[in-house]
Image (cartoon, grey):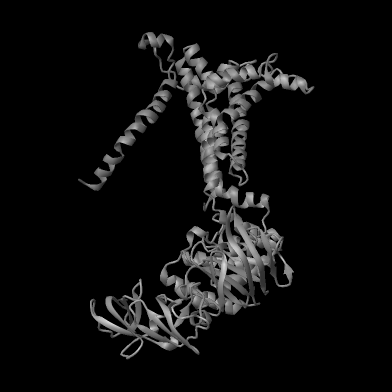
Amino acid sequence: MSSLTLRNIHKNFGNTAVLSGIDLDVADGEFAVIVGPSGCGKSTLLRTIAGLEDLDEGTVTIGESDVTNLPPSKRGIAMVFQSYALYPHMTVYENMSFGMKIAGSSAEEIDRAVRTAAETLGLTALLDRKPKELSGGERQRAAIGRATVRRPSIFLFDEPLSNLDASLRVKMRHEFVRLHETLETTMIYVTHDQVEAMTLADRIVVLRDGRIEQTGSPHELYTYPANRFVAGFIGSPAMNFLAGSVVETRLAQTIVRLASGTTIQVKVGSGELSPDSPVTLGIRPEHLTTGGDHNLVETEIKFVEPLGSHSYVYLETLDADEPLIFRASGDFRGAKGDKLAVGISANNCHLFGEDGKVL
Amino acid sequence: MKPSVAGWLFVGPALAVIAVFFFLPVLAAFAISLTDFDIYALADLSNLRFVGFQNYADLLQRPLFWQALRNTLYFVLVGAPLSVMVSLAAALLLNGQMVRFKGFFRTVLFAPVVTTVVAVAVIWRYLLHTRYGLINYGLDWSGLPIVDWLGDPRFSMPSIILFAVWKNFGYNMIILLAGLQAISVDLYEAARIDGANARQRFFHVTLPSLVPSLFLVGVLTMAAYFQLFAEPYVMTQGGPIQSTLSIIYLMYEEGFKWWSLGSASAVAFILFLFMIVAAIGQLVVMRRYGSGV
């Protein structure tokens, strides 16, 4: 078990900067999820931690030791690949024991380690099978098994669930949580799926264009996004954004005029912003209400998505380019074309300045 | 129409082609090998006599046949593995991440394959010429004794093997290169994380993943090398002192020099049996080491 410290990580591919000045601390035993849209550099970041990519600048420290110039096998890490990367000509047992065999461990030692890991993961019955004889989920577990046999101080997972079908993905997500509870090892998990990030992480690291946008617990990121990107990325369906301008600022309160001229009172202070400064108002689907009498936005229903327990209602309005998404109760009875005035809950609004940063 | 009839109709054309161009010639060759088909029989078929396995018995008693068989096996057992190894080495080099101008090198290394064997054999005969050859010139220049490449029975077959390897390795190289490129990069990275060095990665990742390609290449190369003919025909005419006389060369001489077509067919049939045995042998070996890929 070990902590991980990244300092000023820079990585370029040719002229393209993939990682630009990443600083990150992951505590011992923490489950950190690196999340971001495709091409944001999250896999590259994981690979620099693994030592599969050389750095242009910066240091990687695992525990107390600087591993920046160590080869992958000497860093005390284990990695699970998106493709699983099981050796196709070896059985599960041979796959799991390969690293120890290379390291020159004794046959008994190898056998003990493989069987212990296999038991933890329910792989014992599959040890003599080759990867092609396994289902997707079983391959996934075999790959995790191979990683655990190495007794790494840090586990690295590169989008491990993206090749599985939806139901298996949910099941494997629970297995990851259980695995983390059992092994209590530091885990770093890369995904583009913010639901995976929310459900697995102790701490989420949101990456965009090779920079960290924000780190924090799932709750922190959801409730206090640092900027418009994080606000839009975390949460499903995404946060609604309405363009507007400042009318008046008071202590911990701002009045915003939307495109249609409607004014909305928001319980967010906007500091030195002068009247008429452009701002973006963000509000999550569950914080839109019906039946109130102020902070109302006039809309028309475009589409209703009933999900049983609740419905998502897509609303067209003059105040936003994209339809607003409103999380209604399961018995919502609106139809396409109906007019609906939705209230914006003043306590749950986010205001973003022109630079995208939260106010 | 019953499904089975439809099935036969679909495979019918292919089966017909295989029957006409494979089974029929094999059976015909076998039938002719049981006769004394010669130039007299060509003139008048009534001269044709059934001789049973006499041709085979005669062949097995001729030292020249054994000499040809030894030469052919020498060529196959040394030349074919050497050719595959050179192909593999070239493919590995071309597949290297650091290599630039890959397309250029691929074309250049493949070029000998598409040349005409007779034409380049003539060029090689010049290269290997004792007095005027570039190779001996180089040996002489660097102070080494010159070699009578094609005139010395010790060097004639190695010279032919070198020429054949040069001529053929590019073909297998392309097949192996495709095999190498199909190996997932993730496997190499997993092996690096497992602590495998370059040599271990080659033996534990590259080679096992290449088994199907190597099998294909091995069988094709072996089949082609058993049929050694054009190289000795152009470069040495089977000499010196029969050191490059191959089975096919013997067959050619029997059939088209002495017009003993019955005996020539017997030679061909024996070669055919050899190739079948060798191919089955390879299949067994590959099944054992390559299962699961």
Indicate the position of residue B147 as horizontal and vertical percent values.
Answer: 72, 19
Indicate the position of residue A329 as horizontal and vertical percent values.
Answer: 32, 85
Based on the displayed image, in which of its 4 quarters is residue B137 positioned?
Answer: top right
Q: Is residue A309 visible to the viewer in this orientation of the structure?
A: no
Indicate the position of residue B223 as horizontal and vertical percent values.
Answer: 51, 32
Closer-to-camera residue (B227/B163) = B163
Taking B190 as reference, is A219 above or below it?
A: below
Please report the residue visible at 73 percent of the width from the left and 72 percent of the height from the top: A64
Q: Is residue A238 visible to the viewer in this orientation of the structure?
A: yes
Taking A253 as reference, is B6 above or below it?
A: above
Based on the displayed image, in which of its 4 quarters is residue A206 positioned?
Answer: bottom right
Taking B224 as reference, is A111 above or below it?
A: below
Q: Is residue A197 left or right of residue A315?
A: right
Q: Is residue A26 left or right of residue B112?
A: right
Please report the residue visible at 48 percent of the width from the left and 24 percent of the height from the top: B268
Closer-to-camera residue (B222/A320) = A320
Quick one: which residue is furthest to the left in this view?
B1
Q: Is residue A170 left or right of residue A113?
A: left
Please report the residue visible at 53 percent of the width from the left and 47 percent of the height from the top: B181
Indicate the position of residue A222 as horizontal and vertical percent values.
Answer: 49, 80
